Image (cartoon, rainbow, N blue to C red):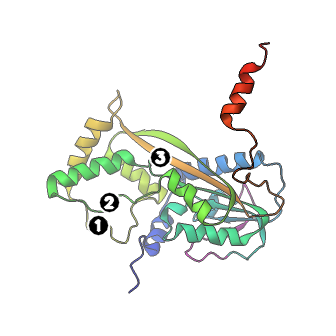
């Protein structure tokens, strides 16, 4: 028996279709970060693919790129690209490792893979407030906020996908909202509300929402009474393996221990 998918892609597409231009501020921030990182790479890219659910974010910035919808099976030609960008979509993939593997297959040797996605600290405050509220009122939890991978788990994805020279880092974006209703409004504008297959599909009870608002305000408000809300963008990069790339030293190939090197440094005369 095939297990159900974690995320409902049909629901995800519908929610993205209702996203607004004003809700794209994190998509735009992610795009700008990726473009800035590309400027630091001493290379010109001639064949680019961008995997995204929001092509309008990229059309003006990289008009020469081929836009690939972020479906479970990516429409990527094998070995065709020297750069593949995966833009804020891995956190809603049913098989993130498979997505990165497919991107790697689309790369030419020594081609670059760059990705961004929401990390595990995203909506941590909302997750905590809803969990406490539902436990208080109902004695149990329902999947109300999508799970998101921690940075170390995303680093492991690069390694398992077979990419060389993997690098992972994150950027935390602190925001604040007047109340929980305004936060949820923004999430809907982003197209980033819950799309889990096992999500609660009936309307959230008013008592639960009010309880969560109270807990959120008590635990996570700033000095102005606004609700603090964290978004974490994780950026991943790796290269398609190639013989020209630097190789890690083999175990035992270092002729000096760290202790020996430190002793020699201590013997050097002071300037």
| Magenta-colored span | 60-75
Secondary structure found at label 2 = loop
Front position in the image: 179 or 254: 254
Number of other residues with Cα within 10 Å of mark 2, as a class: few under 14, some 14 to 19, many 20 or more: some
- The residue identified by callout 3 is 231
Front position in the image: 161 or 266: 266
Secondary structure found at label 3 = strand
Marks 3 and 1, Cα distance to the nearest angstrom? Answer: 23 Å
- The residue identified by callout 1 is 200
First in sequence: mark 2 vs mark 1: 2
What's the residue at 23%, 49% (across, down)? Answer: 132
- The residue identified by callout 2 is 144
Hey, which quadrant is residue 135 in on the image? bottom left
Hey, which quadrant is residue 70 in on the image? bottom right
First in sequence: mark 3 vs mark 2: 2
Residue 54 is a magenta residue: no
């Amino acid at each position: 028996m095939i297990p159900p998918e974690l995320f409902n892609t049909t629901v995800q597409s519908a929610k993205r279709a209702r996203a607004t231009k004003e809700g794209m501020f994190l998509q735009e921030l992610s795009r700008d970060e990726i473009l800035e990182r590309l400027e630091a790479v001493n290379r010109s890219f001639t064949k680019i693919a961008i995997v995204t659910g929001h092509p309008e974010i990229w059309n003006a910035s990289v008009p020469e790129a081929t836009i690939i919808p972020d479906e479970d099976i990516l429409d990527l030609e094998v070995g065709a690209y020297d750069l593949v960008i995966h833009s804020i979509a891995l956190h809603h993939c049913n098989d993130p490792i498979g997505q990165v593997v497919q991107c790697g297959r689309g790369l030419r040797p020594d081609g670059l893979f760059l990705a961004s996605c929401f990390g595990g600290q995203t909506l941590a405050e909302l997750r905590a407030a809803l969990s406490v509220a539902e436990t208080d009122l109902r004695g149990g939890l329902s999947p109300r906020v999508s799970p998101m991978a921690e940075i170390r788990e995303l680093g492991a994805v690069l390694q398992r996908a077979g990419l060389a020279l993997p690098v992972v880092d994150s950027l935390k974006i602190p925001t604040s909202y007047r109340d929980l209703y305004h936060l949820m409004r923004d999430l809907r504008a982003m197209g980033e509300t819950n799309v889990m297959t096992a999500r609660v599909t009936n309307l959230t009870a008013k008592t639960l929402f009010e309880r969560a608002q109270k807990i959120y305000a008590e635990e996570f408000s700033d000095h102005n009474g606004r609700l603090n809300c964290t978004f974490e963008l994780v950026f991943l990069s790796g290269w398609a393996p190639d013989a020209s790339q630097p190789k890690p030293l083999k175990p035992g190939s270092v002729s000096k221990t760290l202790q020996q090197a430190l002793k020699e440094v201590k013997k050097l005369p002071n300037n």
